[in-house]
Amino acid sequence: MKAIRFLNTYEPVTDFYRDLLPILSSNKVCCEVVVSSAQYRIGRQALHASMLGEHARVRRIAAGVAHANNRIKKILVLVSFTFGALVLGLFGSQVSLNFFLTQPPLFAVTGRLFRRLRGQRYCCLVMDMYPQVLEANGILHSDNFMYRCFQRMTRSALRGADVVFVIGRCMRERLMAEQVDADRIIVVHNWANEQRIYPVPRSENPLSQKFGITDEFVVLYSGNMGIAHSFDTILTVARQLKSRLDIRFIFMGEGVRRADVLHEVESSGLTNVMVGDLQPESLLAFSQSLGDVHFVCLKKEFTGLVVPSKAYSTLAAGRAIIYEGSQTGEIALMISEENIGSVIHPGDVGALEHAIVSLADDRADCKAKGQRARDLALGKYGRDAAVNRYVDALSGIVASMTIE
């Protein structure tokens, strides 16, 4: 039976394994998911082989900690996973194909080693571009010797792969600039499972009561508040709209920027802004439906290096999107092409305020954009469209190989 081994420190934030592997399993492709025993995000349902199909299994590399909730633990998890996955790749059962996701950032270089020593082909899925992300974060500079070594190793890994999957057109352009063969780059957008995330009327949403929302227009930010995100513009707009009692701002999630948001809310007395916790997976339909419009942001320097996956949850929830970021980013392109919201240049307070007020004053237009978003989640940007692209590509790679 053909076999694919998927390697990534944590389960991806998208529904990647849960939606893709049952289809591969039904096509009699044996799938092994190798992840750390540690969880990256508390509250997410643990991945089990029973979710993935008859011919799938999950192998967990012991990490010594339950959750990677600080820097030291994250390093421990990365080291333990790297060592365990390397031993497994060298001495474990034979597979047709190794499938490397982004974490650990350099681990895909072992693809060349496994191919030379064990005759295994490999492909990569780039969800975050390293080491460029580290430069954008201010951790490494492109003139740094370590950065250049990191970059050469990553280039080597990507150039040697049979296929390199990316999650945005902007990312494809970045890889082509790294001299990765364009013919081997396949763009497959992220997605959200439209059966688990769907529009919920406000009158039926328990979170509306929890946040005291009745008829107010809600601008929602839901997800990670990380280094790649900036909330200065949206918080400035919130200050300027304090007198609009019909408009509310809600931030739900965790991350290093959450403290900054809380500080600004408290110091500026923003009574029109509420900050909530990241909701468990079972409540995603309710949390994503809480907003009338979702705010998504990405610092300009991260364009093409990451693609905000939260935008696809917004599509599934049937909500319009206001995106603050570069117009060349994947989410900006999608919004402009499909007319499901607005794209705001980073730091343009006036444009962001206008976009919010316009939708708040024309709820029918906002609802129409949200309906178009939901239609996209059921079609062009939906689960089936993305999964089928993966299945077609992977089936083509393993079709010519026989595993004893």
Image: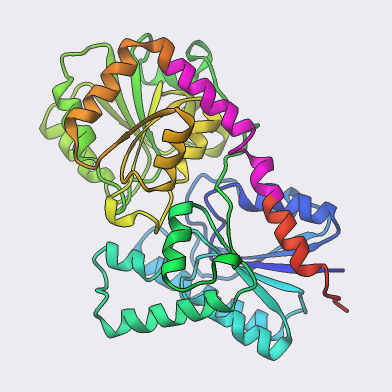
- Image quadrant where one finds the N terminus: bottom right
The relative height of residue 177 versus residue 345 in the rendered view (above or below) is: below
The residue that appears at 39% across and 40% down in the rendered structure is 332
Badge count: 0
The residue that appears at 59% across and 27% down in the rendered structure is 375
Place of residue 114 in the rendered image (x, y in percent of width and height, measured from the top left):
65, 84
Q: Quadrant of residue 194?
A: top right
Furthest-left residue in this view: 267
| Residue 18 visible from this viewpoint | yes
Q: How is the image coloured?
A: rainbow
Along the line of sight, which residue is nearer the eye, 203 or 291? 291
Q: Quadrant of residue 131?
A: bottom left
Is 117 part of what is drawn in magenta?
Answer: no
Q: Which residues are magenta?
A: 366-388
Secondary structure of the magenta portion, mostly? Answer: helix
* Side (left or right) of 325 relative to 336: left
The residue that appears at 54% across and 46% down in the rendered structure is 44
- Image quadrant where one finds the C terminus: bottom right
| Residue 8 visible from this viewpoint | no
Place of residue 95 in the rendered image (x, y in percent of width and height, measured from the top left):
76, 75
Q: Quadrant of residue 357?
A: top left
The relative height of residue 230 versus residue 112 in the rendered view (above or below) is: above
Along the line of sight, which residue is nearer the eye, 67 or 189? 189
Place of residue 35 in the rendered image (x, y in percent of width and height, measured from the top left):
60, 65
* Side (left or right) of 70 relative to 192: left
Place of residue 100 in the rendered image (x, y in percent of width and height, measured from the top left):
59, 69
Furthest-bottom residue in this view: 117
Is 380 part of what is drawn in magenta?
Answer: yes
* Side (left or right) of 90 relative to 324: right
